[in-house]
Amino acid sequence: MTKIEPIYLTETLTDAFERFFNFSPDMVCFVSIDDCYFKKINREWERVLGYTKDELLAKPFTEFIHLDDREATFKEVERQMNGNATIHFVNRYRAKNGSYRWFDWNASPSLNGNILYAVARDITEQRKAEETARMSEEKYRALVDNSPDLIIRYDCTNRILFANRPIREELRQLLNIEEHEYIGKTFRELGLPADQCALWEQDIQKIVKTASPFSKEYSYETTRGSKIAGKLEFEKIAFKLNELINELDMLFDPVAFNKGIVLDMHIEDNVPNILIGDSFRLRQILSNLIGNALKFTIKGRIDLVIRKVSEYGTQEIKLEFLVKDTGIGISQYKNNEIFKSFSQADSSTTRKYGGTGLGLAICKRLVEKMKGEIWVESKEDEGSSFYFTCVFDNFDEKNYTEVREDLNLKIVQSKMH
């Protein structure tokens, strides 16, 4: 009885190699580095490019390469001559029908450096799919970019990945702005000369710090709509109202003085000095309103008045804040529009005074989160009066015993937190 040996025992190493070489789904070849001719190719070359084996072996392989890819290919061959392997080098080869196929190469030189062992994979369909996707994305981006709507894309960490043209034009000075740039921008918008900025910057820097995150963080939140409004976090920490107002006076009084404008801040006697709430948000709202008043007021005065509206038992108190100016005023038809994102009373206002039109929309969201409302009474050329209300918790010494120092301000924190 004849014993049948398995094929791997009877097949010679040469036969096995030939089988692997010819039936590989990729294009396998040996190339002479000296004269750039193919020395051996498998059947896949004929199938993919349409040439016969003899036609491919009759010319230097460089003649089949796309003109735009030849220089890069020559540099890659030089690397191989120095003993370096090639991993995922991409170029184009001309097929017999005149079209070009994209090849992804892996190659390694022989020990003596004369022969290159190479494997190429046809990735033409993949590249076509990528190009189709790229063109579709470009069309989509162009559509989105030119949309009159405000469109913004975020990643899972709330970092902006894409903002369309209307947003980019408005936020160009706000996105990724450095603190010192913000300070300079603040003074420039308010008309403060550069030589005086240096004199006051050190004293007010700690205050302006609270405004800088406002421009960056809340400009994002405003454009994102109602979903973000629900995510805003508000602190309840005891603070002294008069010290907050003194900080604002320190910030804005030099600017008002420079413009020849009277700036007066008044707290009515029945308003408690210690309140429980988010002083950071309150400072942001007031900074925006007072900053706008200074920007749009050429002469006259600006007044901040704080009064008590009502109390809700012993737990809460509602305060009303009024920022009144003698500036350019607002048309009555625009009084409600100015609280919308990227809106100003007039397009000429943006050209003349600058700004993004974001501030009041941000203020509106912050006020609403503080259980209040904001509105304006104004006439053109007669000035504006911006009102807003906020609800705070009343201070109760029994529940607030821990005191800490923070920037020389006494902050009293609740035991209930």
Image: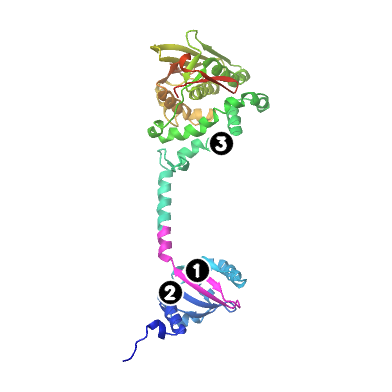
Badge number at residue 177: 3
Instruction: Name the front one of labels 1 and 2.
Output: 1
Identify the residue at image location x=44%, y=32%.
Answer: 222
- Colouring scheme, one of rainbow, by chain, secondary structure, one colour: rainbow
Location of mark 1 (residue): 105
Of pointers 3 and 1, the one earlier in the residue sequence: 1
Which quarter of the rendered picture does the N terminus lie within?
bottom left
Q: Which residues are magenta?
A: 105-131
Q: Is residue 111 left or right of residue 119?
A: right
Tell me where residue 199 sits by quadrant.
top right
Q: Residue furthest front?
A: 1
Identify the residue at image location x=50%, y=18%.
Answer: 401
Identify the residue at image location x=45%, y=74%.
Answer: 27
**Along the line of sight, the residue nearer the viewer: 322 or 416:** 416
Location of mark 2 (residue): 49
Label 3 crowd (10 A; few <14 / some 14-19 / many >=20) = some
Horizontal and vertical percent for residue 320? 44, 15
Dot 2 and dot 3 residues touching (CB under 8 Å): no
Q: What type is the residue that disc 1 sits on? A: Trp
Q: Is residue 312 above or below residue 56?
A: above
Q: Residue furthest top?
A: 269
**Along the line of sight, the residue nearer the viewer: 347 or 16:** 16
Instruction: Name the front one of labels 3 and 1.
Output: 1
Q: CA distance from mark 3 to mark 1?
A: 44 Å
Horizontal and vertical percent for residue 236? 46, 23
Residue 348 part of the magenta segment: no
Can the viewer see residue 50?
Answer: no
